[in-house]
Image (cartoon, rainbow, N blue to C red):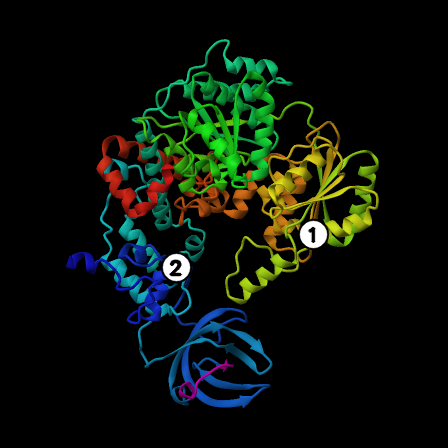
Amino acid sequence: MARAAANRIPTTDPAAKTAKASAPQLAMARLGLVRDIDLALHLPLRYEDETRLTPLREARDGQTVQVEGVVVDNRVEMRGRRQLIVKLDDGTGEVQLRFLNFYGSQQKSWAAGVRLRVRGDLRVGFFGREMVHPQVRTVQDGTPLATSLTPIYPAGAGLPQAYLRKAVEAGLRRAPLDEVLPPEVAALLPAHWPTLRQALHQLHHPAPDVSIEALGEHSHPAWLRLQFEELLAQQLSRLQAKAERAHLKAPVLPLRTGGLHEQLLGVLPFDLTAAQRRVCEEIAIDLARPQPMHRLLQGDVGSGKTVVAALSAAIAMEAGWQCALMAPTEILAEQHFRKLVGWLEPLGVKVAWLTGSLKAKAKREQLAAVASGEAQLVVGTHAVIQDQVEFARLGLALIDEQHRFGVAQRLQLRRKLEATDLEPHLLMMSATPIPRTLAMTYLADLEVSTIDELPPGRTPIVTKVFADGRREEVIERIRDEVARGRQVYWVCPLIDETEASDEAADLAAGRHSAKRPPLDLSNVTQTHQDLSEALPGVGVGLLHGRLPAAEKAEVMDRFARAELSVLVATTVIEVGVDVPNASLMVIEHAERFGLSQLHQLRGRVGRGAVASVCVLLYAAPLSDSGKQRLRAMAETTDGFEISRRDLDIRGPGEFMGARQSGAALLRFANVGELADEGGAGREGGGDGPTLLQRVQTAAQRMLLRHPEAAQRHIQRWLGQKAEYLKA
């Protein structure tokens, strides 16, 4: 017990806020710095070089330098405000230290004749060479310099760097950093890579001659060793989950000649593309196996994933099993429901509808149909996984836009067969194509099917980027489109002034959420009013998430029947809305949307034979990431290229929805920089294996020959987070 206590930094749960805990201890707990290993892995953001002194005569304007000298003058002056001015002489020149905020004790301790060691940015001011608010230490002649670069750590309020450095150093000494990799796995690494313990020591205490650039770019061998270890834990956990599923049992759902699958193919009003046929075959092979399928179906916007899902469900239903399709929004779920009812009910399939907005009586009827098995296919939102939903025989679970569901929700749907020894097959769908390197790390336990071909007849979408000042030109274009009998979407980020007020309250209370846009954004109700006035005689509809479900359905139905020519909406139309006559998409404050979301919204047009345009309205000034997103949208309509750029901009954690789902994020390895081919990701850009290839080889060997070492490695890096990776 004493040993366990020694392996933990004395702190407390920040929620408890006990009187005994100091502010730094609470701040460390908020950063997750509880165990020694947490502190050892809390790496510096940057470094300061306190290992050398620069003579003032050699220092250059704008340079960050460390200088040591004797105070020759010390006084408080009024230069618009009270300032402490300290003049320092190092024997080669003088520099003025200026402090806008200071204590009286500092003025006394930095008196004339005192030796100071200072570090800061040297600049030439009105009164000569100066440093403003440099770091200051009182020293004696001959006080030794630092022997390694000084780390600057990520820290929150109430957590001084000096306190954090001591804590990290203590954690680094005590953390269990013994080698876990078996010798044959360690042999896969370059000989000059350090051990884990050595790597961490080098990163916390880099030698003065180490390249700061290599440390900053994470290309130093110590960084590569850490990235390898972290990626290996991620890969081991994924592959372990895949191996565990191989021992689970699932219903065997064979593809039968002349069955419902063939009947559905016969009544579809279109032919499948070659890509759709290929992925249907891949899914059919999985469903015929006695182990649960765990497959991701990915394809660009409009590539036809819904019909693949319907054909997969037909195989399961023909075998006497139920299917469930869960979508993140009611509008998307309803679009699926309408399509599936149109295709399947003529073939005798009963399709149930489950959402949170159903009236009590209707909900009881739907639940009874599901429990009895009368409903062969259940379509809905997260209501599908609620406790009161009982399936008679759930054989296949379909999850659309799977990254928008939490891990717990996905696990809950898979557990709907817990009463038996069987687990349902799982097909997840995503309209955000996932780059290959990301799939190889985050999705190592998944089989991936890709629809890389759009149905014939789709017209390319032209994307134009306009400043907000050109709004009148855009409205004039809307008049032209409506006059031609076409329809238009206008998407806004906010609903009404109430939401803006809520945002203001959150900001005042320090609760700002990145999910909410800033206050100055146009709101959908005002835009609806403005467009209604600017387009007299034109039907302008309003659609947002706060409308009652019946009203939302009515608005969408009227737009689909062309009774409304313009639909002003929030991002509730992001996925699932299919109106082929819509030829113009206007996205207001486009700089505030994510790249994937912009691509999804753009995909609401170009769904018919009519040439379509997407207009991105932005408000200046644009951030760097905002410029990158709008440039990407203007340059390509390829969903795979959009995904690659989105990964570069956002990073893998946000791209994969990992922050929402709870999946373990990679802290040290940047998957977006790991290349499958070419020199990138290889040691020194040579011809050797990439970092990711080393990881994959190591993971396979450890699981096969050293399972205990694999488990220790997973526990060290992921702990309980490993469970999330099984969803």
Horizontal side, residue 647 vs residue 270: left or right: left
Front residue of 597/183: it is 597
The location of residue 376, given as percent across then percent down, is: 48, 23
Badge 2: few (under 14), some or many (20 or more) residues near its Cα, within 10 Å? Answer: some
Res 327 visible: no
Residue beneath label 2, please?
A: 44
Residue 149 or residue 719, whichever sits in front = 719
Rendered position, 299 above or below 154 = above
Residue toward you, 43 or 652? 652
- Which dot, 1 or 2, sits closer to the camera? 1
Q: Is residue 295 above or below residue 202?
A: above
Magenta run includes residue 528: no
Give the residue number, with chain letter if any, for mark 1. Answer: 525
Q: Is residue 192 left or right of residue 439?
A: left
**Looking at the rendered structure, which numbered label has been put on residue 719?**
none
Residue 408 at x, y percent in the picture = 40, 42
Dot 2: element: loop
Residue count near mark 1 (Cα–Cα under 10 Å), binned few <14, some 14–19, many ≥20: some
Q: State which region is magenta.
A: 95-107
- Which amino acid, mark 2? Pro
Amino acid type at circle 1 is: Thr
Tell me the residue at 69%/24% (across/down): 457
